[in-house]
Image (cartoon, rainbow, N blue to C red):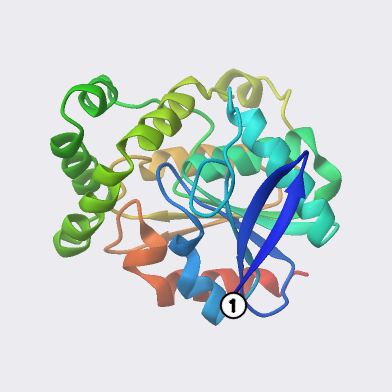
Amino acid sequence: MERVEVDVDAVKLSFLKGKDVDIVYIHGSGCDATLWESQLSDIGGYAVDMPNHGESCKAEIRDIDDYAYFVAKAIKKILGEAIVVGHSLGGAVAQKVYLNHPKVVKGLILVGTGVRLRVLPQILEGLKEKPEETAKMTSRYAFSDEKLADEFSKLFAERATILLKDLSLCNRFDLLEKYRGGEIKIDVPTLIIVGEKDMLTPVKYSEFLKQHIPNSEMVVIPEAGHMVMLEKPEEFNRAVKEFLKKF
């Protein structure tokens, strides 16, 4: 895998790149492009470090729309248009990329996400007061595999500041009434993937998306939690490859 850099308004965005496929992966809260290493190796495409994450530069981010702006501009520069994959916070960003910059999106893959992403108050408060302890708790919610949860909790603890920022943005993200009222219409092919045991964005969140996106299909991956692409990479990648046959 190689690194690709893209300048958007003088902000350097860093991407991990697999083989040439028109896919861009967007990570979730407190994560970076390395979240998608299995997908990049097996499927290909580009995984972004969003601003303030990984090897990308710092930028002022006030809301999800700001993340979407940087990602959309980078997609336009690299590929013109792409199938946009987003996990959790990244799923919110992916929705906003489509809604605000539709010309760069030819398909969506929404992973462990929803149209509203409320965060437990004890997580938001805990990351301020007891970051290490709260990072461990958050990681336990994110994985059904305890070993992976313990490994990831160290990463979350190291990134407690940006994790708190990201989760605060998630907590304010709310498109529920716009979907319910028909104001939001997604008309590109969409794949919805969720882990059967996801405690952070439960299966019902994905079911809502499926009900409100006409050209969509949904895959529930057994024995997987929120970090489904890490816990069940083979099953995850199989679902993505099947979806790609549409293009």
Location of mark 1 (residue): 43
Judging depth in this view, the residue of 187 and 93 nearest the camera is 93
Judging depth in this view, the residue of 222 and 201 nearest the camera is 201
| SS category of the residue bearing label 1 | loop
Rendered residue at 42%/50% (across/down):
31
Q: Is residue 246 above or below residue 81?
A: below
Label 1 Cα neighbours within 10 Å, binned few <14 / some 14-19 / many ≥20: some
Name the residue type under label 1: Ile
Relative placement, left or right, of 74 versus 208 is right
Q: Is residue 204 visible?
A: yes
Rendered residue at 46%/29% (across/down):
170
Q: Is residue 37 above or below residue 173?
A: below
Q: Quadrant of residue 85?
A: bottom right
- Pick the quarter of the image with the N terminus: bottom right
Rendered residue at 32%/55% (across/down):
196
Q: Is residue 99 above or below residue 23?
A: above
Q: Is residue 45 above or below residue 143?
A: below
Q: Position of residue 161 (x, y in %)?
A: 35, 33
Circle count: 1
Relative placement, left or right, of 108 versus 101 is left
Q: Is residue 188 visible?
A: no
Judging depth in this view, the residue of 12 and 229 nearest the camera is 12
